[in-house]
Amino acid sequence: MNIEKVNIAVIGQGYVGLPLAIEFGKKYPTIGFDINVNRIDDLKNYIDHTNEASQEQLRSADQLNFSSDINDITSCNVYVVTVPTPIDEFKTPDLSPLRGATKMLGEILKKGDTVIYESTVYPGCTEEVCVPLLESGSGLVFNQDFSCGYSPERIVPGDKINTLTTIKKVTSGSTLEIANFVDDLYSSIITAGTYKAASMKVAEASKAIENAQRDLNISFVNELALIFDRVGIDTQDVLDAAGTKWNFLKYKPGLVGGHCISVDPYYLAYKAENLGYHPEVILSGRRVNDNMSTFVANKMIKMLIKAGKQIMGSKVLILGVTFKENCPDIRNSKVADVDNELKEFGLEVDAYDYEADPAEVKEEYGIDLIDQIKEKYDGILLAVSHNKFSMINIESLKKDSESVVFDLKGFLPRNQVNSRL
């Protein structure tokens, strides 16, 4: 297929799909498709509640339209799937959104069409799960009537410097010809360039290990934080000292949430276990990071007790509930786990986050965000380092001189906090 003749539909208009649709829409006829009618209505009015795209950026894609009607994408010949791939309550891959999108495309797939997947999966998922659904739904034959590609997303929510076009893109295809086509297509919009992987499985695996590596590095410093807390020294001080060596990796401890780092390792582990191998290192890192919310809550309780505070009925303020700074994304936020732990101890907990959508937080975690800070607190927990939190007078939020401040991000001035993670 000639890229000059493409007619693209980007399936899913979230943090990944919308920026992609915008860039494609600057060069090719493109439809941003999502089953969420309200989301599509907002985008048609140049409103993006994820804050990934401004009105100016949405208007800049003069060949981009939005739709939630499947009939509007039947004439497209390239379909790019960017739906979520979360994990379930048992920490195994939940492929229901991916299966649903693929079944939908199977109903409209035509000869000569190409389906490119960006959703994070385990190695082999595209060919083992998606292709059979496309074949059964369409009655077409893979690599004869239609083709597939895989190009893992590398979007960093909230990052305005490392954006879609400035991050090198890994590409792949089900045949050499399709691999070249997919690479040419992405090369036309990615200024940082592309890297053509040896196969779709290689491309799938590359995405999985990117985030598994980061997860393991963070789990290492999180474990150091657990050790140094017992030693009685500040983890940040240790990291600053070790960081004076040129080859020391400067990762910081913290709560690990979001749609990638806290999820992708489980996809890799799932595939490994299906093949008869139990991945010790990957899963041990996950255990450390998943247990950090319990450590944080227990540490806060110990700080309050040491300060002479009565736990039952004491009031604590949590600053930030999103999974990272300067971003409204609350997916897999571990702050919610801390909130629950503190409440189980009998504390009264307020949570404040100007970035997060209160309705979304309530629906997802059952937490009622306060819209402004009006009270004084026995304890203050800074969980997310949003820029505007630097403008808050922390001292003014304390109930008395014995009130404690626990800074998980090393964000506040050292003399304003009782402890850092």
Image: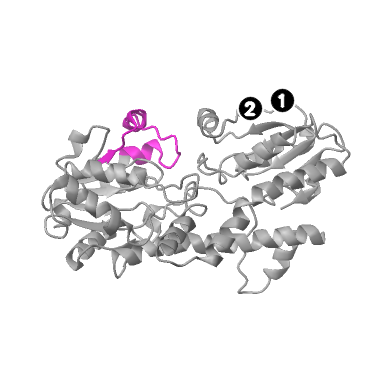
Image position, residue 417 (x, y; %): 78, 46
Residue situated in front as seen by the camera: 221 or 277: 277
Kind of residue sitting beneath label 1: Lys
Image: magenta residue range: 31-59
Residue occupied by mark 2: 370
Mark 1 lies on a secondary structure that is loop
10 Å neighbourhood of mark 2: few (<14), some, or many (≥20)? some
In the rendered image, which quarter contains the N terminus?
A: bottom left
| Residue at the image point whose x is 71% and y is 59% from the top | 225
| Residue at the image point whose x is 40% and y is 41% from the top | 53
Q: How many marks can you see?
A: 2
Mark 2 lies on a secondary structure that is loop
Q: Is residue 58 above or below residue 131?
A: above
10 Å neighbourhood of mark 1: few (<14), some, or many (≥20)? few
Q: Report the Cα–Cα distance between label 2 and label 1.
A: 9 Å
Q: Is residue 399 above or below residue 246?
A: above
The reply to whether residue 233 is in sight is no
Q: Is residue 336 above or below residue 180?
A: above
Image position, residue 165 (x, y; %): 36, 55
Residue occupied by mark 1: 374
Image position, residue 331 (x, y; %): 50, 42
The reply to whether residue 290 is in sight is yes
Kind of residue sitting beneath label 2: Ile
Image position, residue 339 (x, y; %): 66, 37
Residue situated in front as seen by the camera: 300 or 89: 89
Corner quadrant of residue 45: top left
Q: Is residue 94 left or right of residue 81?
A: right
Residue 338 counted in the magenta span: no
Q: Which mark is residue 178?
A: none
Q: Is residue 107 above or below residue 270?
A: above
Check if mark 2's residue and mark 1's residue have beta carbons within 8 Å. yes
